[in-house]
Amino acid sequence: MPHPASPSKLLAVAISEWLLVLPSALLLATAALRLMQPRQYEPARTSWVIFEWATTHISHAGAGLLFIGLPALAVVVGGLVLWMLWRGNETLRQDLAAALASLGRHLAIAVLATGTLLAGAILAAVLLHIITD
């Protein structure tokens, strides 16, 4: 049975994965944000500046690496690490089974909570839109 990974190594892998995905996530969020309101208003104006910079400075190969290569690497590395952890850690398997059982018992509360959070996010976006117009 393999020895468990140290928390510092797992944290390093987790941070590495976030750093691999962060540039594409930031650019995708910027692309979406720029279309949410007229170009002359913030934050759409800043999003347009970032988006236009990215489209002029990132080549097709760079975009492929940024939007396909780095996330794919994160999926492969993360999947391998999770698979190794899953195989070598009985406590992890038991904890996940308990969490899923708890979620099953409280499914209505989980659905209610996610609906409430989504409604709050929509309300915040609408109020921000009203305030900025």
Image (cartoon, rainbow, N blue to C red):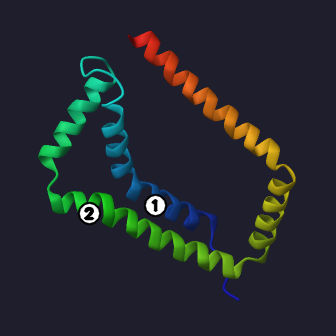
Q: Are marks 1 and 2 in contact (CB under 8 Å)?
A: no
Seen from the viewer's position, the closer of residues 130 and 15 is 130
- Alpha carbons under labels 1 and 2: distance apart: 15 Å
Q: Is residue 30 above or below residue 74?
A: above
Quarter of the image that includes the C terminus: top left
Task: Give left or right: position of 126 versus 38.
Answer: right
Asked if residue 4 shows in the view, the reply is no
Residue 104, located in which quarter of the rendered image?
Answer: bottom right
Element marked by disc 1 = helix
Q: Position of residue 91 (x, y in %)?
A: 79, 72
Q: How many C-alpha atoms fall within 10 Å of the one at disc 1: few (<14), some, or many (≥20)? A: some
Q: Say what amino acid the circle numbered 1 marks.
A: Glu
Q: Say what amino acid the circle numbered 2 marks.
A: Leu
Residue at (68% x, 40% y) in the render: 114
Element marked by disc 2 = helix
Which residue appears farthest toward the bottom when viewing the image? 1
Q: Position of residue 122 (x, y in %)?
A: 55, 27
Q: Position of residue 47 (x, y in %)?
A: 28, 31
Question: Looking at the image, is mark 1 or mark 2 nearer the viewer?
Answer: 2
Quarter of the image that includes the N terminus: bottom right
| Residue 104, label in figure | none
Asked if residue 18 shows in the view, the reply is yes
Q: How many C-alpha atoms fall within 10 Å of the one at disc 2: few (<14), some, or many (≥20)? A: some
Q: Position of residue 107 (x, y in %)?
A: 80, 49
What residue does disc 1 label? 17
Seen from the viewer's position, the closer of residues 124 and 16 is 124
Seen from the viewer's position, the closer of residues 124 and 85 is 124
What residue does disc 2 label? 65
Residue 74, located in which quarter of the rendered image?
Answer: bottom left
Residue at (50% x, 20% y) in the render: 126
Q: Is residue 64 above or below residue 85?
A: above
